[in-house]
Amino acid sequence: MSNTPHGPRPDTPLKKHVLKISPIRKFSHGVVASPARWEMKLSATFRSAKIPRALPPKSGEPAAAASASCAPGSSPAEAAKGKAASGWCVYLIASSRIPRTYVGVTTDFPRRLRQHNGELKGGAKASSAGRPWNLACLIEGFVNRSEACEFESKWKNISRKMARKRSEPSMTSLLQHREMALSRLKTDLACSHLKIKWHSS
């Protein structure tokens, strides 16, 4: 067996590396050699690793930034709409026979009024005694059913808690009472987006 140690022989030249970096040379006057030579070799060695520039979109193709603000699956028009009003509304009806009012919520008031008046099935039992009913106030512009029901419930609660006159109530006083309760409700809830319209009988 040969006693030659493993590894390259002293006289065998080592393979040259692809990247050669010259050591920093410091001259006698204290100035360090310029690294321009390093930059040239690094640029030549890693030329393939450069990140390509983003090409501008071709004519007729939308830019990526144009659709970035839109939610997935929605058009820019739908994204710009935000909160849109639904068909839910709160109504106040007044009996034309006895001094009584009724507050309710619906998506189809003309049909609901016919139900209250017994023309269609489905009217509330509490309103059967006051037929026929007429529209006194209609509030539209609610975002969804939850907002409309909350408005209806608070309007009824404020009306119950407010003090009433001890004398026999008239239809005029009842409507004034409902209107005052509505004014208080508008201070507690955001109602700027709602359309409130009173109707004279």
Image (spheres, rainbow, N blue to C red):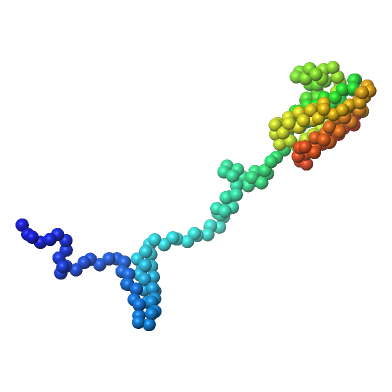
Asked if residue 126 is positioned above or below residue 55 in the image, the reply reads: above
Q: Report the residue that reaches farthest toward the left.
A: 1
Quadrant of residue 115 in the image?
top right
Residue 134: image location, x then y, percent: 86, 26
Q: Residue at 73% across / 30% down in the picture?
A: 149
Name the side, left or right, on which 105 lies relative to 68: right
Q: Is residue 119 visible?
A: no
Q: From the viewer's perspective, is residue 72 above or below residue 199?
A: below
Residue 85 image point, x, y percent: 72, 38
The quadrant the N terminus occupies is bottom left
* Figure check: 9 above or below 138: below
Task: Judge left or right: residue 49 versus residue 199.
Answer: left
- Location of residue 139 in the rendering, given as x and y in whole percent from the top left corner: 80, 34
Closer-to-camera residue (11/139): 11
Say whether residue 129 is left or right of residue 21: right
| Residue sticking out furthest to the bottom | 29
Whether residue 71 can be seen here: yes
Measuring from the top left, give residue 93's x and y in whole percent.
84, 26
Q: Nearer the viewer, residue 126 or 67?
A: 126
| Residue 102 falls left or right of residue 173 | left
In the depicted structure, whether residue 71 falls above or below residue 165: below
| Residue lying farthest to the right in this orientation | 167
Q: Name the quarter where the C terminus is drawn.
A: top right
